[in-house]
Image (cartoon, rainbow, N blue to C red):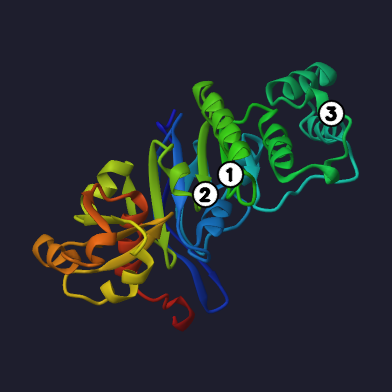
Amino acid sequence: MNEFAIDVRGLVKRFGDKTAVDGVDIKMPRGAVWGFLGPNGSGKTTTIRMICGLLRASEGSGECLGYDIATEAAKIKLETGYMTQKFSFWGDLTIRENLEFVARLYQMRPLRQIVDKTLENLGLTHRQNQLAGALSGGWKQRLALAAISMHDPKLLLLDEPTAGVDPQARRDFWDEIHRLSTEGMTVLVSTHYMDEAERCDRVVYLANGKVVTEGRVEKIIERSALITFRAEGEGVRRIAQGLKGKPGVDHVAYFGSALHVSGTDRTLLAGAVAGAGSGDVNWEEVRPSLEDAFIALMAEAGADMREHG
């Protein structure tokens, strides 16, 4: 058995004269939880769809769960659970009816017992007779996860599954992801949330259709070579604009009520922040965050030139 759940090389996808994905390589071990990050339009969804056989690659090759992505897409789909960005189940059916329908699609037996167990595992039993269309975002998300995981797939592909749901629902969702992972499932999840990315074994960052970096969070931060100073106090918003463009200042970004000022030249950066905000701002050097590193990566990636061939 191939040690990799996903092993793709040189994936390219063109739509007409636009290149959406441009030479993506991913080797993802079985049983891992990987984060798939990048700005909107970076190629994450298109890559996921090529991996699971929903889209044919224009160039490149690879295997998913040991099956060829070009010639064995049907086998990949049977062993994969794919959660789309938009809720894609039936709003005029109850939670139970949705799960029963999915179970019938996979010819699962005994149907009632399997659905009962799925409802229990995902905390849906007490809501099983509610219409799916009347659920909040968090409960719709939980129903979708139940539906795509009930046939015990070997791989879950989750495309921005927590967008638009509250923090508690996001936390509960990730608890389920890690529970499924401990049971042997491999998970690739795209997300915009840095705290979610930090829950993953490794992350892959896409920009402009290309892989910019891949690895463990701490190594990505280390490779960025960033130095970051954090400012707190009543005057931080007043000084932000003045810091931009100063020698040594590469990035200025808000983190809640604090300001992060980052660069790669410690001497120039320290000189830029020295005295900024005078007595109503407190400065300290901090470990750069993953978001700091990704802001730097986006700057390195530059403008998206895919439209221009």
Residue wearing tag 2? 190
Please tell me which of labels 2 and 1 falls first in the chain: 1
Residue 49: x %, y % from top left: 58, 53
How much space separates mark 1 and mark 3, taking CA atoms? Answer: 23 Å
- Placement of the C terminus among the 4 image quadrants: bottom left
- Classify residue 135 as left or right of residue 301: right
Residue neighbourhood size for the residue with mark 2, other residues' Cα within 10 Å, grouped as few (<14), some (14–19), many (≥20): many
Q: Which mark is residue 66?
A: none
Judging from the image, what secondary structure is the residue with disc 2 in? strand
Q: Residue at x 49, y 80 (%)?
A: 307
Residue 142: x %, y % from top left: 69, 36
Q: Is residue 192 above or below residue 242?
A: above
Residue 8 in view, yes or no: yes
Badge 2 amino acid:
Ser
Looking at the image, which is closer to me, 115 or 53?
Answer: 115
Residue neighbourhood size for the residue with mark 1, other residues' Cα within 10 Å, grouped as few (<14), some (14–19), many (≥20): many
Residue wearing tag 1? 158
Mark 2 in CB contact with mark 1 (< 8 angstroms): yes
Judging from the image, what secondary structure is the residue with disc 3 in? loop
- Front position among marks 3 and 2: 3
Q: Which mark is residue 128?
A: 3
Residue 68: x %, y % from top left: 52, 45
Residue neighbourhood size for the residue with mark 3, other residues' Cα within 10 Å, grouped as few (<14), some (14–19), many (≥20): some
Badge 3 amino acid:
Gln
Looking at the image, which is closer to me, 234 or 78?
Answer: 234
